[in-house]
Amino acid sequence: MSRLSMRKMSDNQSGVISAVKVGGELGRRIRDMGLVPGTPVRIQGRAPLYDPVALKIRGFTLTLRNSEADHIEVEVA
């Protein structure tokens, strides 16, 4: 398995969150949205200019800015 930034994942690619590499207020907000290590995630799609990115996580769709997705490391097969 390889690890990469969530921003670099392709559409319909799945993986498991391995780390949130930011602290402070932004790190807390990301974790409060349910993006914690061990959580399965799938990239559902992207906006026409590739920002934001839509994720399928825990049965719902969540959108993140690329600047937020940069801080989330995902383990992909």
Image (spheres, helix red, strand yellow):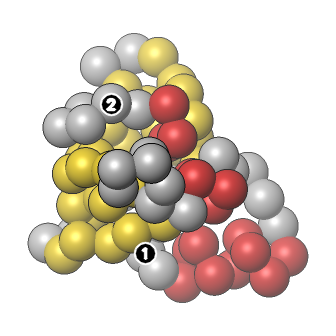
Residue that appears at 85% across and 76% down = 24
61 displayed left or right of 69: left
Q: CA distance from mark 2 to mark 1?
A: 21 Å
> Which quarter of the picture shows residue 22?
bottom right
18 displayed left or right of 21: left
Q: Quadrant of the C terminus?
A: top left
Residue that appears at 52% across and 25% down = 3
List x then y, in percent, for residue 2: 47, 17
Residue that appears at 26% across and 64% down = 57
Ranked by sequence position, the earlier of labels 2 and 1 is 2
Residue identified by numbered label 1: 34
Q: Quadrant of the N terminus?
A: top left
Q: Residues within 10 Å of mark 1 (few under 14, many from 20)?
A: few
35 displayed left or right of 26: left
Task: Look at the image and tell me whether residue 58 can be seen.
Answer: yes
In the image, which disc is placed on residue 10? 2
Residue that appears at 25% across and 49% down = 45
> Which quarter of the picture shows residue 60?
bottom left
Q: Residues within 10 Å of mark 2 (few under 14, many from 20)?
A: few
Helix, strand or loop at label 2? It is loop
Farthest residue toward the left?
59
Farthest residue toward the right?
24
Give the vertical position of 51 relative to 15 (above or below): below
List x then y, in percent, for residue 20: 64, 55
Give the vertical position of 64 relative to 77 (above or below): below
Helix, strand or loop at label 1? It is loop
Which residue type does callout 2 highlight? Ser
Which residue type does callout 1 highlight? Gly
List x then y, in percent, for residue 38: 41, 52
31 displayed left or right of 45: right
Give the vertical position of 23 relative to 46 (above or below): below
